[in-house]
Image (spheres, rainbow, N blue to C red):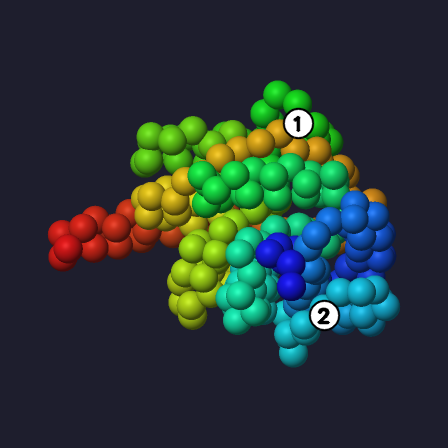
């Protein structure tokens, strides 16, 4: 068995999943692939099953975070050393995976984040609301932890078993969108986090899993989640 498991969450990605899998398989990586079909109403699961990958399907749409946690549970049960999170919408360039694997194999890091904002990274133009949100979360993370993270909303990540085994436990990971709140929690838990330059591409087809989110309401929601994380951390420190 390989040490690495690539987790690909997907919801209604029938127009993208084949190209995503072809791109990853073309890299010739020593990694297994798990597609978590999050209750898609289209042919996402069937298309994925035509490739040499494992497909797990939720009976209905549970959310992006729930799909990731299903992957964490699978990786923990199968004894993988590392997982690589890779979105099923085609925005992550498969060439990023080798770099994530290389960083994790060094053994001195727990979480590797692929950043489109570091020198050497590339991205497509995003809307003003997205840019404001990213800067807001950057500032919040810096203010609460003292650590600088250039791309706090990046879904392209490599994670060690110590981390994903913790979040495989029920109620430790949000079902909808794990964001700056979880990143802050990870920093407070003393996980070693590193960013590397990454290449991102514009979605060519389908609708984003984040579509319909109101930027202002989302920032308020995550801010509340961050407050809960900080409060829990403070109370836990008092007890210990």
User: Dot 2, how many residues are within 10 Å of its Cα: few (below 14), some (14-19), or many (20+)?
Assistant: some
Direction from residue 140 to residue 124 in the image, left or right: right
Check the image and report above or below for 213 versus 99: below
Mark 1 or 2, nearer chain start: 2
Residue 95 visible at all: yes
Q: Which element type, helix, strand or loop, lies under badge 2? A: strand
Q: Mark 2 points at which residue?
A: 55
Q: Quadrant of residue 190?
A: top left
Give residue 111's position: percent from left, percent from top.
Answer: 49, 44
User: Dot 1, how many residues are within 10 Å of its Cα: few (below 14), some (14-19), or many (20+)?
Assistant: some
Give residue 159's position: percent from left, percent from top.
Answer: 52, 49
Give residue 4's position: percent from left, percent from top.
Answer: 62, 55
Tag 1–tag 2 contact (CB < 8 Å): no
Front residue of 115 and 42: 115
The residue located at (73%, 49%) in the rendering is 29
The residue located at (45%, 39%) in the rendering is 108
Q: Residue 121, labelled with which disc?
A: 1
Direction from residue 128 to residue 28 in the image, left or right: right
The residue located at (52%, 39%) in the rendering is 106
Alpha carbon separation for disc pair 1 and 2: 30 Å
Q: Quadrant of residue 147?
A: top left
């Amino acid at each position: 068995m390989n040490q690495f498991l690539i987790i690909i969450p997907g919801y209604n990605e029938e127009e993208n999943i084949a190209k995503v899998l072809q791109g990853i398989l073309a890299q010739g990586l020593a990694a297994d692939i798990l597609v978590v079909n999050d209750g898609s109403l289209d042919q996402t699961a069937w298309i994925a099953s035509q490739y040499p990958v494992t497909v797990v399907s939720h009976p209905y749409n549970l959310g992006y975070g729930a799909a990731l946690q299903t992957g964490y549970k699978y990786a923990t049960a199968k004894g993988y050393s590392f997982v690589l999170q890779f979105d099923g919408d085609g925005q992550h360039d498969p060439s990023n995976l080798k770099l994530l694997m290389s960083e994790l194999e060094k053994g001195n890091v727990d979480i590797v984040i692929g950043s489109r904002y570091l020198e050497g990274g590339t991205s497509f133009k995003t809307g003003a609301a997205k840019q404001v949100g990213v800067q807001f979360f950057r500032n919040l993370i810096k203010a609460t932890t003292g650590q600088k993270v250039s791309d706090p909303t990046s879904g392209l990540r490599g994670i060690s078993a110590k981390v994903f085994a913790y979040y495989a436990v029920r109620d430790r990971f949000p079902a909808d969108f794990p964001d700056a709140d979880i990143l802050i929690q990870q920093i407070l838990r003393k996980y070693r986090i590193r960013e590397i330059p990454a290449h991102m591409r514009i979605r060519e087809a389908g609708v984003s899993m984040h579509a319909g989110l109101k930027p202002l309401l989302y920032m308020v929601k995550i801010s509340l989640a961050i407050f809960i994380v900080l409060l829990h951390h403070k109370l836990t420190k008092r007890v210990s």
